[in-house]
Amino acid sequence: MDGLRAYRMITAMWIRSTMAYRASFVMTTIGNFAATALDFVAILLMFSRVDALGGYTLPQIAFLYGVSGVAFGLADLAIGSMDRLGRRVRDGTLDTLLVRPAPVLAQVAADRFGLRRLGRVVQGALVLGWALLTVDIDWTPLKVLLMPMMLLSGAVIFCAVFVGGAAFQFVAQDASEVQNAFTYGGTTLLQYPPTVFGRELVRGVTFVLPLAFVNWVPASHVLGQPYPLDLPEWAAFAPPLVAVACCALAGLAWRAGLRTYRSTGS
Amino acid sequence: MGTGRLYVAVAVGGFRRYATYRVATAAGVFTNTVFGLILVYTYIALWEERPHLGGYDQAQAVTYVWLGQALLSTLSIGGGGFEDELMERIRTGDVAVDLYRPADLQLWWLAADLGRALFQLLGRGVLPFAFGAVFFEVALPSDPVTWAACLFAVLLGMVVSFGLRYLVALSAFWLMDGAGVSQMAWLAAFFCSGMLLPLNVFPGLLGEVVRALPWSSLLQAPADVLLGQADPLGTFAFQAAWAVALLAAGRLVQSAATRRVVVQGG
């Protein structure tokens, strides 16, 4: 609870400071929107030349893209500045956070909170909206229920990846790009159907880093596509469990990372 | 002779400066490899659907992906070159000190950025490219002349990239906060350089327009030289023309900007 309060206060502070330069805020939000839209433009360009990719039609891929985009966008909005941790460890400014009477994780998560990241969420939501209007789905109550669950669990899974990546930076301070490979790389991966990728890669993002539960597995149920790796039917409903497990592991990693922290002394 | 040595020293400094970030370089190699993997599978799926799309066969398309990952940070297609630093110096007024130095501002930064680019090519480019060549079916030329021609096209691409980013950096003289312009610049670079998708896959008129723009010098030009899709001499001429035009534009803007410089006391 302490953490939540600290998180709210710090984010509110950053929002106020952002709003001091409104023109810049509008520009960077549009920029964020455009930057993520570029990925979708690539997909549209591909579909100007083909009718299907990996057995998925354009609306179906837009569905995958939208879910991945919204889930990742929410995580990025909430705690997307976690990749700055390495820099704080390097230059010693993490010490300031350690002496404050609030959980370090909450402070790091809220650090430089960027409201402009809403641009990414909006972009994902628009593509998802378009997908829902055009895609052919046999709606059942269960499938409707899966939608919000997918987005929320997905956001939580991505949050866990952010925290895990930050924990890794306690050890490898200069390696924020490794984190990008899993966060930005992860969301890019999920924008395409699992049928496109090599079996080993799909296995890796299902059982090792379970990104597949953000959209691939539950979306297979919604879209009526074959499950990746022939997973059982119920796997589509596993994302909340996977999300909780990811959070537990990320929390452990964070604690372990924080314990290894030695100040630079500068 | 004396001044030539100065700029060589600046370039060497730029090279060595980036060479000190060993962990960051390793992290970058990892990230480029991960993104290369994701892209290469989508390209394979695309070329399976439409063989010989854009005049490439599948091995050529795969080669194109890995070349793109090798050149991404070399040519600063996603930003991250000298421009952030120059903009910061303009914003804080430190640029006034630079202007008093007995060296040319544009040449100074060009030398520093070439040094950086050469390091990134060796440090971050070679390994992902080698990874791709080992694990995927690629189309590499066997004669050393083509390789040399490709390297020369990369070198010209470095100058064109610098010319573009120098203009971006100088915009800080008028705008102070260059974040928005930087973002627009890397979006344009991503879209128009062929980083998003090879430019010959772009449909119709759009493809012709992006091919005529300076950004096509960055990735598309060296790639087509390497893959034997373009006449090297014609490509060099195209790149050199843009390099000269952009450097001249940079000169013009620079002299307009420096007339505006007001050194704040204190």
Image (spheres, coloured by chain):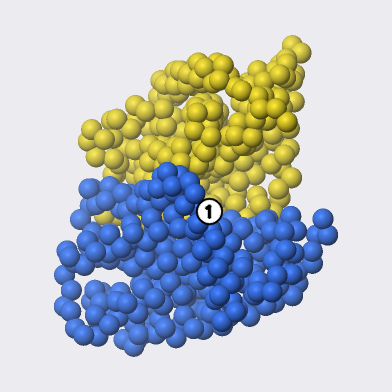
Find disc 1 in the rendering and name its residue. Answer: A17
Q: Tell which residue pokes out farthest to the right in this image.
A: A265
Q: Is residue A80 above or below residue B53?
A: below
Question: Tell me, what hue is chain A?
Answer: blue
Q: Image point 52% across, 17% down: which residue?
A: B256
For residue B23, above or below residue B81: below
Callout 1: SS: helix
Residue lying farthest top?
B1
What residue sits 44% from the left and 54% below the top? A116
State the residue at coordinates (52%, 79%).
A246
Q: How many marks?
A: 1
Q: Quadrant of the C terminus of chain A?
A: bottom right
Q: Is residue B124 left or right of residue B228?
A: right
Residue B74 appears anywhere in the view: no
Residue B117: image location, x then y, percent? 61, 35
Residue B266 percent across, percent down from the top left:
73, 31
Q: Colour of chain B?
A: yellow
Q: On screen, A93 above or below A4?
A: above
Query: Looking at the figure, which quarter contains the N terminus of chain A?
Result: bottom right
In-image side of A149 versus B128 (left or right): left
Front residue of this view, candidates B107 and B173: B173
Coordinates of residue A82 in the picture (x, y in percent): 58, 63
Note whether B252 is above or below A27 in the view shown: above
Crowd band around label 1 with a 10 angstrom C-alpha radius: few (<14), some (14–19), many (20+): few
- Chain under label 1? A
Q: Position of residue A170 (x, y in %)?
A: 70, 66
Q: Is residue B219 left or right of residue A220?
A: right
The image quadrant of residue B55 is: top left
Q: Which kind of residue does numbered mark 1 sit on?
A: Ser
Q: Residue at x 72, y 39 (%)?
A: B17
Query: Does residue A229 show up?
Result: yes
